[in-house]
Image (tube, rainbow, N blue to C red):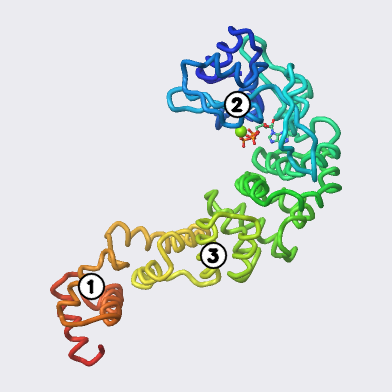
Amino acid sequence: MRISDKAAFIIERLENAGYEAYAVGGCVRDSLLGKEPYDWDICTKALPDETKSVFADLNVIETGIKHGTVTIIIEHEPFEVTTFRVDGDYLDNRRPESVKFVRNIEEDLSRRDFTVNAMAYSPARGLIDLFGGMNDLMAGRIVCVGDAKTRFCEDALRIIRGLRFASVYGYEIEENTARAMTETCELLKNIAAERINTEFTKLLEGKNCKKILTDFTEIFSCFFPAFSTENWLFAADAAEEACEPKLRLAAFFCTLFPAETEVRNALHLLKYDNAAIKFICSLSSVWKDALPGNINDMRKALFCTGYETMSSLAKIRKDAKAQKLIDEITEKNLCCGFETLAVGGHDIKKLGVQGKQIGKILETLLFAVMEDKTPNNKEELIKYAENLMEGGNF
Ligand code: ATP
Ligand code: MG
């Protein structure tokens, strides 16, 4: 197993100060799979204050002292170092607020969710794998640590986490674990939407998302606003077909809910952020429309609907012709918005126009440019505007 130099440095320093320490959780799993871990979490016997004094010469942030976590910054890279701990009492099937520090790694590993996530590694002590995590990793299996039903009752978010890992790694969910998921899924109603949506979004980005969404529809219906099962299956397909992660969420919601208001309500209930809601609703508003087939219609669509929405729609539909039109517009820097129109409000004002009329004239000019009725240069546009005014159009 390979470990990053900086993580190894932290572990070694803690060990030299007399505190057992390991890389743990997701980074061990990913590293064993030959993937570059997203971040390196470290766990140690040292209490947070002890960790702080071991790294007194470095920048140490008290990220979650209550939970035993401090963050050590090495050359701008953050490393979370957490004291061995177990969770306090579980209330309402949610992760507890309080934790209890323990003095050995075994207890810490036993509170973790799945066997593949419950391994620790240190260069000096090797791999600590108490629950057959390595075996399950190689077999491609998601298995709870301990009794599955008990673990899901403690914290129901683990159900969605399990589905997320199965989707991302293309793994099976072991039979007992899968049954316990279905038996306890109602408890997901007690889980904060923000926690669910982080896992759900990652699930959608997984290579096996269609299979997981299809095989476990009942579980999703516990926290999703009402949906038609038929649409759910189409949406699962649409998500897996979408090529980019961000587009998967959009394709999924736009297919699941036919009306923009339903899409908005669902995203809102699931506490997606405003940027995501805005983007997905804008796509939903043109979801069933045909894509423009010529360059001028595409320019108008880019203006009316927005570049991001139109290019996303073209990508989701895998419409090469529409994508080419957008590329051509970008390459030639063709005007499709007020920013690139060769005249502005002050130019029109000079013609003696006032108030709202200025905006109306500018918009008419913009459409004239996009329809190739006039070149986009100042002189021609002023002439065009004067003609409009003389014609009594304004
Ligand atoms: P990712 O690669 O997405 O970060 P991860 O496994 O590191 O995946 P995190 O949410 O970062 O996931 O959690 C780190 C570790 O903490 C997990 O590997 C697991 O051991 C443990 N863990 C996280 N959430 C839970 C939970 N709800 N119940 C039990 N253990 C958990
Ligand atoms: Mg992680």
- Give the Cα distance between marks 3 and 2: 37 Å
Q: Are marks 1 and 3 in contact (CB under 8 Å)?
A: no
Q: Residue furthest bottom?
A: 392
The 10 Å Cα crowd at callout 2, few under 14, some 14 to 19, many 20 or more, is: many
Q: Which residue is mark 2?
A: 41
Label 1 secondary element: helix
Q: Quadrant of ligand 2?
A: top right
Above-or-below relation of 273 to 71: below
Q: Position of residue 177 (x, y in %)?
A: 82, 39
Above-or-below relation of 347 to 176: below
Q: Quadrant of the N terminus?
A: top right
- On the picture, is 390 further left or further right than 162? left
Label 3 secondary element: helix
- Circle nearer the viewer, 1 or 3: 1
Q: Quadrant of residue 89?
A: top right
Q: Quadrant of the C terminus?
A: bottom left
Question: Which label is found at residue 281?
Answer: 3
Question: Which label is found at residue 345?
Answer: 1
Of pointers 1 and 3, the one earlier in the residue sequence = 3
- Give the Cα distance between marks 1 and 3: 31 Å
Disc 3 marks a residue whose amino acid type is Cys
Is label 2's Cβ within 8 Å of ligand 1? Answer: yes
User: Residue drawn 32% across and 58% down?
Assistant: 330
Q: Residue furthest left?
A: 379
Q: Are marks 1 and 2 in contact (CB under 8 Å)?
A: no
